[in-house]
Image: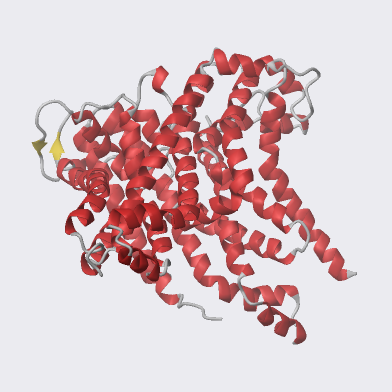
């Protein structure tokens, strides 16, 4: 009876296309980055092994550390600004009866859009002369700000845009968790005389901790991935003020054809992401046991 | 009384958030039919004095939005179908064919892909495509896009196929169907709802992709919409009305798809790994 579903040739035939593509575009590039990261190579001729020189260079390179710093701004902003906002709005939406569907549908819209288009749209809003923000500032008598070309404001402007795009996405995730909590729990608390705020803090919050934990992890991963928004809005400028590790890698690796050094930065992105995930798992994820209703 | 006041405070805060989300779209929509930059600057909030729909024509024809649009449509569709095809074959082999130990191992192996930071792969994939001599052609996007969605697609399709009762294919085996027959005639038709979800999510992902499209293609004729739009802004940055029309062109298709299939999109996207 199992013969038809125990055909080795068919099994190989079914698995082969995906394995070839997967190995070629996930596994091989990862190994290749590790191999080439230890070489000096401009793309022509054979890569020359030069040990840890690239990594030495990266670690003493101020611009590289600056890009690491900007990545950490992304992470800190996501975790300490965005996540509280996400939780606040999720609780708010879960508590209203009217328009719940509208809020849920609308907040998600920016997440289905191209980051490039979001970037263009927001550069328009930040535009110094005719952009929405400066027109408003001028109207209320405040000096206009060069949002994207001022070193002090460029990073903040990008973080706001990024938050605008992704906050609603996580709200919908958290909202789904809140709405799946059995109503009886909340009703019991109402009978016991707990008000809305008390119920949110002592009932809903503990029950949604696991999903908040997932949201924190996803937004850290997202913060490590954000590069397109930077390329579109500022290209890393002004003067590298908004460079993140990935844009720095692209600048070296592709634009300047320094493949060896570029690949060593790719390796560092791997390692940093791994370290952050490991720290997160050790510190936070392990404490959040599964919640059973 | 206090209760209803609390409710209205909630609604006021939520409406403010809603405006913050939706107003930028309205701003672009209004700007797209204004006469020039001067009108946008002097009247940023209101409707235009007269509607200049020629901005849309200019953007579509002169700024080549039409070319970018067709490139994006073609690449996103082709890659999404290709990913689904190979992933459903694999998901079938993993979940329905009787090689449990190998399948479990291969499944875990493919899952690793979800943990690999995509940005770190950009440069080695660039080098790989360069060595294969396809850098600068559409294949340089088609193959990595198809491959890139594999882990997510396999996870979703495997989960779905695992939930199909095994009596179904046992009966088909009795009737003399081969594994291929069971896949095409029994399992795949049942999997259609999951296929629709992963198709839409992959399509949106491919339609929106920017980094590879920006670095792996250098000919203007071959550019995809997001890259074309950025080029548009950099070249025509004096004409914000036309640029806004271009933005509207890039947003409308995803908005329509989202309007029709929001449930599938939300489920699919939140099941995959994403950024923010």
Q: Position of residue A159 (x, y in %)?
A: 53, 44
Q: Is residue B153 above or below residue A229?
A: below
Q: Residue at x 35, y 25 (%)?
A: B217
In the image as oriented, which residue stretches furthest toward the bottom?
A192
Q: Residue lying furthest front in this view?
A: B175
Q: Is residue A125 left or right of residue A223?
A: right
**Residue A220, image x, y percentages:** 44, 55
Q: Is residue B23 left or right of residue B163?
A: right
Picture quadrant of residue A208: bottom right
Q: What residue appears at the point 47 percent right and 77 percent down from the top-left corner?
A: A290
- Work out which quarter of the rendered image holds the N terminus of chain B and state it: bottom right
Q: Residue furthest top?
A: B62
**What colour scheme was applied to this rendering of the protein?**
secondary structure
User: Is A242 located above or below residue B217 in the figure?
Assistant: below
Q: Can residue B254 be seen in the rendering of this structure?
A: yes
Query: Does residue B219 sit above or below B14 in this rendering?
Result: above
- Please indicate whether residue A7 sits to the left or right of residue B238 in the image: left
Work out whether residue A143 can be spotted.
Answer: no
Residue B140 in percent (x, y) is at: 31, 31
At 51% across and 37% down in the image, what residue appears? A114
For this view, does B37 lie left or right of residue A229? right
Q: Position of residue A8 (x, y in %)?
A: 17, 59
Occupied quadrant, residue B55: top right
The residue closer to the viewer here, A293 or A120, is A293
Figure label count: 0
Q: Nearer the viewer, residue A215 or B204?
A: B204
């Amino acid at each position: 009876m199992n013969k038809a579903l125990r055909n080795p040739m068919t099994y190989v035939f079914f698995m082969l296309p995906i394995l070839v593509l997967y190995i070629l575009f996930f596994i091989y590039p990862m190994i290749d980055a590790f191999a080439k990261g230890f070489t000096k190579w401009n793309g022509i001729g054979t890569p020359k092994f030069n040990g840890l020189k690239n990594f030495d260079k990266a670690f003493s390179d101020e611009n590289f550390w600056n890009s690491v710093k900007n990545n950490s701004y992304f992470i800190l902003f996501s975790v300490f600004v965005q996540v509280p906002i996400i939780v606040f709005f999720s609780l708010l939406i879960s508590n209203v009866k009217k328009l719940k569907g509208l809020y849920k549908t609308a907040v998600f819209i920016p997440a289905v859009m191209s980051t490039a288009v979001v970037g263009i749209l927001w550069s328009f809003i930040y535009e110094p002369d005719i952009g929405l923000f400066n027109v408003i500032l001028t109207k209320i008598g405040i000096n206009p700000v060069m949002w994207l070309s001022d070193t002090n404001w460029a990073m903040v402007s990008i973080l706001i845009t990024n938050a605008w795009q992704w906050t609603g996405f996580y709200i919908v995730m958290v909202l789904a968790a809140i709405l799946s909590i059995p109503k009886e729990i909340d009703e019991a608390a109402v009978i016991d005389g707990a008000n809305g705020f008390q119920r949110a803090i002592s009932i809903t919050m503990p029950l949604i901790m696991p999903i908040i934990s997932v949201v924190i992890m996803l937004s850290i991963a997202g913060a490590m991935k954000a590069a397109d928004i930077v390329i579109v809005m500022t290209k890393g400028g002004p003067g590298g003020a908004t460079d993140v590790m990935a844009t720095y890698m692209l600048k070296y690796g592709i634009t300047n054809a320094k493949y060896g050094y570029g690949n060593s930065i790719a390796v560092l992105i791997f390692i940093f992401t791994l370290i952050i995930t490991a720290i997160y798992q050790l510190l936070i994820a392990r404490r959040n046991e599964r919640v059973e209703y | 009384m206090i209760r209803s006041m609390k409710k209205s405070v909630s609604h006021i805060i939520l409406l403010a958030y809603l405006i913050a989300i939706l107003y930028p779209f309205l701003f672009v929509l209004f700007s797209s039919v204004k006469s020039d930059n001067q009108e946008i600057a002097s009247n940023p909030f209101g409707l235009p004095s007269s509607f200049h729909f020629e901005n849309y024509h200019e953007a579509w024809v002169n700024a080549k939005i039409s070319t970018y649009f067709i490139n994006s449509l073609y690449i996103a569709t082709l890659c999404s179908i290709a990913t689904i095809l190979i992933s459903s074959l694999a998901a079938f082999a993993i979940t329905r064919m009787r090689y449990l130990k190998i399948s479990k191992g291969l499944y875990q192996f493919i899952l690793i892909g979800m943990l690999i930071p995509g940005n770190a792969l950009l440069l080695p994939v660039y080098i790989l495509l360069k060595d294969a001599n396809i850098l600068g052609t559409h294949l340089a996007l088609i193959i990595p896009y198809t491959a890139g969605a594999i882990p997510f697609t396999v996870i979703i399709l495997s989960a779905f196929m695992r939930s199909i009762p095994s009596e179904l294919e046992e009966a088909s085996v009795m009737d003399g169907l081969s594994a291929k027959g069971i896949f095409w005639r029994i399992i795949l038709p049942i999997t259609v709802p999951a296929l629709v979800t992963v198709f839409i999510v992959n399509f949106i992902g491919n339609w929106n992709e920017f980094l590879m499209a920006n670095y792996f293609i250098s000919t203007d004729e071959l550019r995809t919409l997001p890259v074309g739009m950025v080029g548009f802004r950099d070249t025509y940055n004096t004409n914000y009305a036309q640029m806004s029309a271009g933005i509207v062109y890039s947003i409308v298709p995803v908005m329509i798809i989202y309007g029709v299939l929001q449930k599938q999109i939300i489920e699919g996207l939140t099941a995959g790994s994403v950024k923010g």
